[in-house]
Image (tube, grey):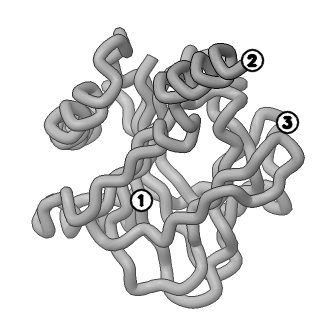
């Protein structure tokens, strides 16, 4: 029996808590970068974003804009944001070296006004393959808007109050249900992106 217990203790050293895959890097984003993206979000993020079943502000209440390759401005900002994400992704890749993906397949600019929120969800349910979710927080002069992670029964297990210039990486799969708490004051600006 003691041999078995000893084996379990040794084995447990190699088991990672799945919350370790949620990595926040604080004060990582340049102030000039954030100002440029906030200005762009104010100009472009005019439409309410949908969930898989369509527009439902009871689940997702946020204005956003999908950057694309159709205009020179969008292409410029896509590359601008992509370089910033790649620069910071090195830190995540160092912790999880067997992660193969590094191709960004979507970048959205988000603007959460008072009452804005996104109920608990996962990011891998779309037709586009998503392996890693990324959130860049562009400001902190708002209240509410915490990023929460839950277990499978939607009990909160981790809460992040993202500061200005923070970036968060986490797996997009079913093990990482998350949501944005309602904004109670001000406007929250962020970028979300995914690696496939």
18 left or right of 72 in image: right
Front: mark 1 or 3 = 1
Q: Position of residue 79 (x, y in %)?
A: 19, 33
Rounded to the nearest whole Å, what is the CA distance between mark 3 and mark 2?
Answer: 54 Å
**Quadrant of the rendering where the C terminus is positioned:** top left
Of labels 1 and 2, earlier in sequence is 2
- Residue at the spot x=20%, y=69% of the render? 35
**Image location of residue 110, percent across then percent down:** 48, 57
Q: Residues within 10 Å of mark 2 (few under 14, many from 20)?
A: few
Q: Are marks 1 and 2 in contact (CB under 8 Å)?
A: no
User: How many residues crowd around disc 1 within 10 Å: few (fewer than 14), some, or many (20 or more)?
Assistant: many
Outermost residue on the right side: it is 153
Between the residue at mark 1 and the residue at mark 3, the CA separation in whole angstroms equals 23 Å
Q: Would you call the spot at circle 3 few (<14 residues within 10 Å), some (14-19), or many (20 or more)? A: few
Q: Quadrant of the N terminus?
A: top right
Report, in whole angstroms, how far the alpha carbon at label 1 lies from the one at label 2.
53 Å
- Tags 3 and 2 touching, CB below 8 Å: no
- Left or right of 142? Residue 153 is right
Helix, strand or loop under label 1: strand
Mark 3 and mark 2 lie on one chain; the one further toward the N terminus is 2
Give the residue at mark 1: 190
Disc 1 or 3, which lies upstream in sequence? 3
Q: Is residue 66 visible?
A: no
**Can you tell which mark lies on residue 112?**
none
Helix, strand, or loop for circle 3?
loop
Return the residue at label 3. Answer: 53
Residue bearing the label numbered 2: 1
- Could you say where residue 155 lies in the image, as x and y percent from the top left? 82, 56
Residue at the (65%, 38%) spot, across then down: 176
Q: Is residue 85 left or right of residue 133?
A: left
Q: Position of residue 63 (x, y in %)?
A: 57, 60
How many marks can you see? Answer: 3
């Amino acid at each position: 029996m003691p041999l078995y217990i000893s084996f379990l203790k040794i084995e447990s050293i190699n088991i990672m808590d799945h919350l370790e895959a949620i990595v926040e890097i604080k004060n990582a984003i340049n102030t000039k970068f954030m100002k440029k993206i906030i200005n762009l979000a104010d100009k472009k993020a005019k439409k309410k974003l949908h969930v898989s079943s369509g527009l439902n502000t009871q689940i997702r209440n946020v204005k956003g804009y999908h950057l694309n390759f159709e205009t020179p401005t969008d292409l410029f900002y896509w590359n601008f944001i992509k370089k910033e994400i790649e620069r910071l992704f090195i830190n995540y890749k160092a912790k999880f070296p067997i992660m193969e993906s590094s191709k960004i397949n979507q970048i959205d600019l988000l603007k959460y006004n008072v009452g804005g929120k996104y109920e608990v969800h996962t990011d891998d349910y779309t037709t586009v393959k998503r392996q890693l979710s990324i959130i860049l927080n562009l400001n902190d002069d708002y209240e509410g808007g915490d990023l929460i992670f839950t277990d499978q029964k939607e009990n909160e297990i981790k809460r992040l109050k993202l500061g200005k210039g923070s970036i968060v990486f986490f797996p997009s799969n079913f093990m990482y249900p998350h949501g944005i708490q309602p904004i109670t004051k001000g406007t929250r600006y962020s970028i979300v992106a995914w690696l496939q």
